[in-house]
Image (tube, coloured by chain):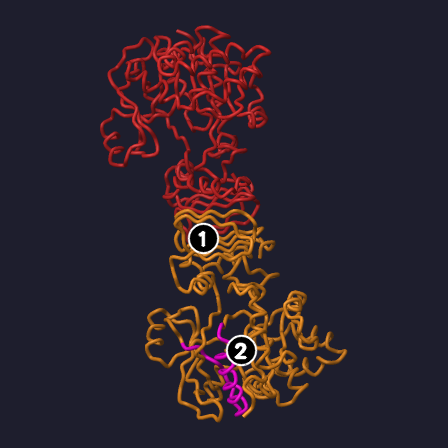
Chain colours: A red, B orange
Amino acid sequence: MSDPSAPIDRFYSVIPAGGVGSRLWPLSRADAPKFLHDLTGSGQTLLRDTWDRLAPISGEQRIMVVTGRAHRAAVEAQLPELADPNVVLESEGRESTAAICLAAAILQRREPGVIIGSFAADHVIPDHELFAAAVAEAVRAAEAGFIATIGIRPTEPAIGFGYIETGEPLAIDGAPSARSVRKFVEKPSLHTAKKYLESGSFLWNAGMFIARADRLLEELGKTEPEMLAGILELAEAWDTPRRGAVVDRIWPNLKKVAIDYSIAEPAAKAGALAVIPGRFRWDDVGDFASVRKMQSGGRTSDLVILGADARILSDASSGIVVSQSKRVISLVGVKDIVVVDTPDALLVTTTANAQRVKSVVDALKLNGSDDVL
Amino acid sequence: MSDPSAPIDRFYSVIPAGGVGSRLWPLSRADAPKFLHDLTGSGQTLLRDTWDRLAPISGEQRIMVVTGRAHRAAVEAQLPELADPNVVLESEGRESTAAICLAAAILQRREPGVIIGSFAADHVIPDHELFAAAVAEAVRAAEAGFIATIGIRPTEPAIGFGYIETGEPLAIDGAPSARSVRKFVEKPSLHTAKKYLESGSFLWNAGMFIARADRLLEELGKTEPEMLAGILELAEAWDTPRRGAVVDRIWPNLKKVAIDYSIAEPAAKAGALAVIPGRFRWDDVGDFASVRKMQSGGRTSDLVILGADARILSDASSGIVVSQSKRVISLVGVKDIVVVDTPDALLVTTTANAQRVKSVVDALKLNGSDDVL
């Protein structure tokens, strides 16, 4: 047995740090995406939280971050330990397949046989030990040739997440809880979500994928051979002076597709996917209702306040206030309210309408208000 | 008969321009009180609206404004026609009895036998002709020796106003609708307000008082002889070099009392009060619910927007937004909301809670947040 507190052999963490988080506008912006905010009250950004969770698992020198060129300085400021060769900059966002598979291909060239685990930069997982234990199992499943994922045991009939239906136990050595995957399903209705919860055989899809880099690319080749060819060409040029020219030629033409569709679902159908049920608390803090709930521990009478310099006066009010200005904010008799106060934009909604905030961002795009996006 | 479009003989308008309007915080402030705002969408301040309503009745040269020293520049900017001797500056607010009776005493010395009419600087009366007709009747009642008031025929069972119970017709020449006053009553419960509305004999107390200046002071002497003595001494010194010294000595020690209590109620008991029922629309725009209602014409589905530079994005929302910043304000699924966005303070409440905004101001005072009051 290896030391459980030591980094896992041959393992590399990949953090795709992309996505604006439109439902968290006006806090999240194109130039200040969700992963650069402290939404947990931990005092540091979600990206930094992610790093701190992964560093003991893979080692600080074995974490790769894939992010937009525009975020390079912010990411490096958050992660001063991040090794320079482990920063992969995208000239434009091409979705998760391109980001994760490019990282896999670069790392496979540098270190044949490497196992990578891809974890979003903006999810919340308070219990690092249970998380690490799940990753350790997933790595064993990956060593056995599976594309592994970690699904989250649902605690409520959430309609904001996709689900994974689990199948039979796989009896993988070192991964006792690994099961096959029957199918991936999209965000369900409340009725369906309740049935999922009751059945006990559905997990939340948290978008975590762990696999041998060569196996991941092999699966990609089955569904998207053109993408694979492009990505292999990029990886071949990556650590050479030709990188810039090859990136300019290939990257903007890569297909935009989520890794769930390009690799995970086809692999599940082919029996090549293994899922480890995670028993840790997890949240993608996808909207302000979620942020409020996480911070209040579910107490609906609470008023959650985010903002170091917040000056809030609340009279018989509940919900969440995010204060990025030094203005006095007064709430009088408003329940389950969401107020997000930034220097150039203000949002007022309710937790019940939190998912609809994305429509505001769409409307702002349409009417040319790019200055506040 | 005199020309109805000419100013009324011997008549002087007095505008007490005081009171912050706490229920309209953070729009109304100590340094930007309610009367300096445009709450009607007329494009000009309530004070200027008041001036424009009174100028045809008394003549521009016969309007006196009583206001705080701090507001002098703002008042003069709003009212460039205001004659210098007609600006009465208070070193500190001493309530309506002191303000109105000092004006009465100054004017009585300058012009014995003058009739004054006192009208708040921050009420809304869209119909100038009906208003002028009511004032004309009130002046006739004043000439007959009455302390006259104009009450407003209620259109709904409002609980935010005091009421006047009318008595018998007074048969005053030139004031056919004048009636005696049975009593003044404080803001009622909804149940009582409904009974008042049904009875047909109650009017809203709009705080308008019209009287011969000497009669007003005579009534004051009956209830507050010390105040009268102080006010007469102030008036005697007013147009002399001694004004400053006398003001410093007397003004800060004058009793703070509303004219309703010091003069109107006692005069009503003594049968010396006459009321003219006003049939014009009137509102004291006392809170944001009132502003919203006035601007929407009562349509509760509307979202009323105040602010020349407002950038508002509303999705399925109703209520009122006051925008004094250039920030984008997004409302998503909030009904009957009140959002008041100023550079240093933000209020979020609902129209149902609009009266409670005063409690915010009280709380801000208590916690030392004078910078936003």
- In the rendered image, residue B229 lying in the magenta stretch gets the answer no
Using the image, name the chain to which the residue with label 2 belongs.
B
Q: Are marks 2 and 1 on the same chain?
A: no
Under tag 2, what secondary structure?
A: helix
Residue beneath the point at 51% across and 36% down: A29
Q: Which residues are magenta?
A: B126-153
Which residue was labeled with disc 1?
A315
User: Where's the N terminus of chain A, which quadrant?
Assistant: top left
- In the rendered image, residue B137 lying in the magenta stretch gets the answer yes
Report x, y in % for residue A2: 42, 8
Report x, y in % for residue B62: 63, 81
B366 vs A365, nearest the viewer: A365
The quarter holding residue B184 reads bottom left
Location of residue B22 with respect to A25 vertically, above or below:
below
Using the image, name the chain to which the residue with label 1 belongs.
A
Location of residue B185 with respect to B138 vertically, above or below:
above
Report x, y in % for residue B349: 44, 54
The quarter holding residue B256 reads bottom right
Residue beneath the point at 66% across and 87% down: B111
Q: Is residue A20 visible?
A: yes
Q: Amino acid at mark 2?
A: Ile
Q: Is residue B222 visible?
A: no
Which residue was labeled with disc 2?
B259
B4 vs A315, nearest the viewer: B4
Q: Amino acid at mark 1?
A: Asp
Under tag 1, what secondary structure?
A: strand
Report x, y in % for residue A178: 30, 15
